């Protein structure tokens, strides 16, 4: 029997597919505003589809459609939004911070025209591990086989920070760079003992990891680690992972960790009225928006302008002021 999460995600995907498979006549005659998201099985793609669904409720009034577009994620989204290839993108707040400050992957290439539209759900630092590997905290990764994501990915970078702050020398861990979509299968097959994934919950990869003979749990972080890491970077905050959707996970209840907000963003030159309409449609249909994916359940309208790292676009700021959310 499929779990509740599977049914919710599948039904959401089918609904979005029906909504965003545009008639050829509409595509030929009406402008399409685009959002770059992530892989089609990820939460970014669902988030982009949900934003588009809210916008398209008034597509006749607006005189055009909005559609989400699959991509490789944050780094590619920043590049193609700034290049003008798409109108909006979704990114982890850390990459917006790196880009706007010209550091990390954007060393010497400061991107000063990034603008925030909406703060979305929080993505949590998550270590998914096999019970038989006896990994009860980050330091227990020593001597284990751990997947940290593809080279250059945010998961690889985050994993490096986790090991460093946990006092673990990477040379003492057998590290793998499998793409995240392979990680759950590799874990169940016994190829790895754990994998690091920064993601919104509930997530299909975690659910798939628990669907096998090998018993799986999510490794909690201790409070000193959480407080220290959150204080060290402006885009991080303490958070908890909600495990209620993971029926076969060995540990239940809220699991303490560190979170990174996902942000809907655009470029400074983006039309102010279009940005205003996007924000207005999402905020004023927030109850419906939350229903599009379980990861959106905790969204709070009063916090969707906060912790977005880069300046708000004038169109977004205008709506938030009118709604009394910001001064």
Image (cartoon, grey):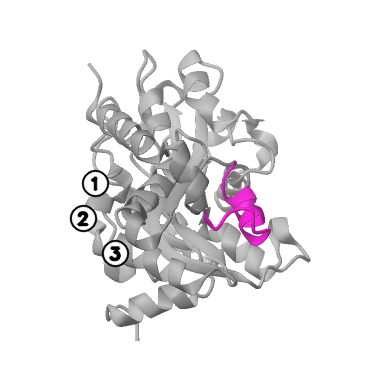
Looking at the image, is mark 1 or mark 3 earlier in the sequence?
3
Vertical side of 182 occupied by 125: above or below: below
* Residue in the picture at 58% in, 54% down: 86
Q: Position of residue 131 (x, y in %)?
A: 39, 25
* Residue 1 located left or right of residue 140: left
Label pair 2/1, CB-CB below 8 angstroms: yes
In front: 124, or 218?
Answer: 124
The stretch in magenta equals 72-89
Q: Write down the residue under mark 1.
A: 291
Whether residue 129 sits left or right of residue 186 in the image: it is left
Location of the N terminus by quadrant is: top left
The 10 Å Cα crowd at callout 3, few under 14, some 14 to 19, many 20 or more, is many
Circle 2: element type:
helix
**Residue 283 — which label?**
3
Q: What residue would you read off at disc 2? A: 287
Q: Which mark is residue 190?
A: none
């Amino acid at each position: 029997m499929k779990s509740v999460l599977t049914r919710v995600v599948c039904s959401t995907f089918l609904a979005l597919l029906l909504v965003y498979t545009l008639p050829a006549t509409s595509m030929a005659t009406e402008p399409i505003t685009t959002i770059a998201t992530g892989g089609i099985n990820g939460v970014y793609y669902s988030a982009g589809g949900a934003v588009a669904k809210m916008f398209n409720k008034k597509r006749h009034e607006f005189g055009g459609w909005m559609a989400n577009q699959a991509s490789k994620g944050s780094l590619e989204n920043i590049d193609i939004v700034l290049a003008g290839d798409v109108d909006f993108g979704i990114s982890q707040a850390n990459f917006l911070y790196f880009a706007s400050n010209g550091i990390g992957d954007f060393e010497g290439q400061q991107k000063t025209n990034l603008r925030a539209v909406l703060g979305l759900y929080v993505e949590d630092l998550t270590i998914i591990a096999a019970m038989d590997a006896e990994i009860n905290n980050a330091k227990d990764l020593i001597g284990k086989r751990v997947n940290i994501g593809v080279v250059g990915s945010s998961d690889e970078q985050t994993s490096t920070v986790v090991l460093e702050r946990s006092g673990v020398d990477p040379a003492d861990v057998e590290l793998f760079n499998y793409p995240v979509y392979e990680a759950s299968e590799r874990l169940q097959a016994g190829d790895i003992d754990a994998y690091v994934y920064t993601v919104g919950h509930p997530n299909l990869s975690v659910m798939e990891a628990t669907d096998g003979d090998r018993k799986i749990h999510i490794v909690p972080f201790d409070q000193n680690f959480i407080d220290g890491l959150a204080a060290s970077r402006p885009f991080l905050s303490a958070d908890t992972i909600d495990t209620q959707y993971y029926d076969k996970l060995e540990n239940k209840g809220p699991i303490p960790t560190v979170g990174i907000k996902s942000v809907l963003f655009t470029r400074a030159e983006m039309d102010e009225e279009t940005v205003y309409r996007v924000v207005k449609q999402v905020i004023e249909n927030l109850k419906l928006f939350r229903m599009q994916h379980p990861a959106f359940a905790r969204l709070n309208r009063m916090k969707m302008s906060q912790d977005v790292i880069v300046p708000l676009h004038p169109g977004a700021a205008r709506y938030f002021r009118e709604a009394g959310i910001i001064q």
